[in-house]
Amino acid sequence: MSKRYLVLLSRASETCGVEEFARQLARRLADRGGTWVLGDGIAGFLERLRQFDGVLLNFPVVAWKKELVRPVLIPLAARFKRKEVVVVLHEWQALDWKRRVVLAPVLALATRIIFSAPEIADEFGRSPLSRVATADRRLIPIPPNLLPPPELHASPVSALLHEQRRLGRVVLGQFGSIYPKKQSTAVLQVAERLIARGNDVFVVFIGSFIKGMDNVEAEFARLAEAAGLTDRVLVTGYVKNDAELFAMFEPVDVFCYVFSEGLTSRRASVLAAALFGKPVVVNAPVRADALRHHGLYQKLIDARAVRLVPTDANPETVADAVASATATPPERIDLQTEIDGMWRTITNTI
């Protein structure tokens, strides 16, 4: 008989990626799962838990940042009732050390730990906590948390981008927040190389700067000006509406990323662009097995929707790949079939 799990959720109306994964997971578990909102009371939780074989927690959830006690009480109470405690860990080393301290007792109580990527499993494996935590550790692929809606809504930004294409320009894009580790300014270097070869290029960054991080915006503007790209670069800012967001993807010819650590399976921005049907040029993972567990990424690479360049590729090499991508569109894949397959893998692993 299949085991049943109670999935912990937050009350958040604006969800982070981890919270959204938890909510989708509860839906995908169907009659094998149920939900409990953290903060509804420990007595009610224990009563509800009687119907399940275990509790399932995802970390880190942004809405739980101020919660110090209850995320520990829940697994403690579950273990007292001889129930399983399954933790899905989406981040580890990237977390502030204080958050790792708060999570330490939860992970020590876990009967199974599931990681979102092999890199996260390695980070946890190198920590002292790993020595006292369960040896039942597994790996799952994380599905895209952002998919193109049935209808797109035009906006002044999407109209501007379509106008750039009508002018004969190649629209080079990047989607997601702008921060140092993402190396967004590397795309400016790629655009500079393409223009030097005689290509007319316009660059759009669909997203916003991370606030309070090392003067990111000022440094970005300085580099754009130094490259002579000031009138060829647009940063849209955060786009809340999905229909407007993906309408901005439509006129982009190629998306481009050059990550400091190479591509990892957890890069949702790359997935979103590729799933829209646009070619994405990105530097390859450092680890040879980084994408092995993620069937959707492998499918996108096979379909030439995701085009890998060497991890340490220079701007000239990336520019070559971008130029090639504009000439050869990717193959279409059966998106729903692939995503359904991912969720079957996830629920079977859990």
Image (cartoon, rainbow, N blue to C red):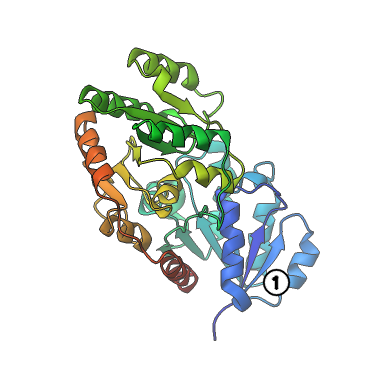
User: Does the image show residue 60?
Assistant: no
The type of residue carrying mark 1 is Leu
Q: Quadrant of residue 48?
A: bottom right
At which x and y percent is residue 134?
Answer: 46, 62
Residue at numbered disc 1 = 49
Identify the residue shown where x is 77% and y is 72%. Answer: 47
Identify the residue shown where x is 62% and y is 78%. Answer: 31
Please state which of residues 271 and 321 is positioned toward the viewer in this rendering. 321
Residue at the front extreme of this rendering: 166
Q: Secondary structure at mark 1?
A: helix
Vertical arrangement, residue 30 with respect to residue 278, above or below: below
**On the picture, is 331 further left or further right than 268?**
left
Vertical arrangement, residue 72 with respect to residue 46, above or below: above
At which x and y percent is residue 275?
Answer: 42, 54
**On the picture, is 113 further left or further right than 239?**
left
At which x and y percent is residue 14?
Answer: 67, 46
At which x and y percent is residue 266?
Answer: 42, 50
Q: Quadrant of residue 106?
A: bottom right
Please state which of residues 49 and 338 is positioned toward the viewer in this rendering. 338
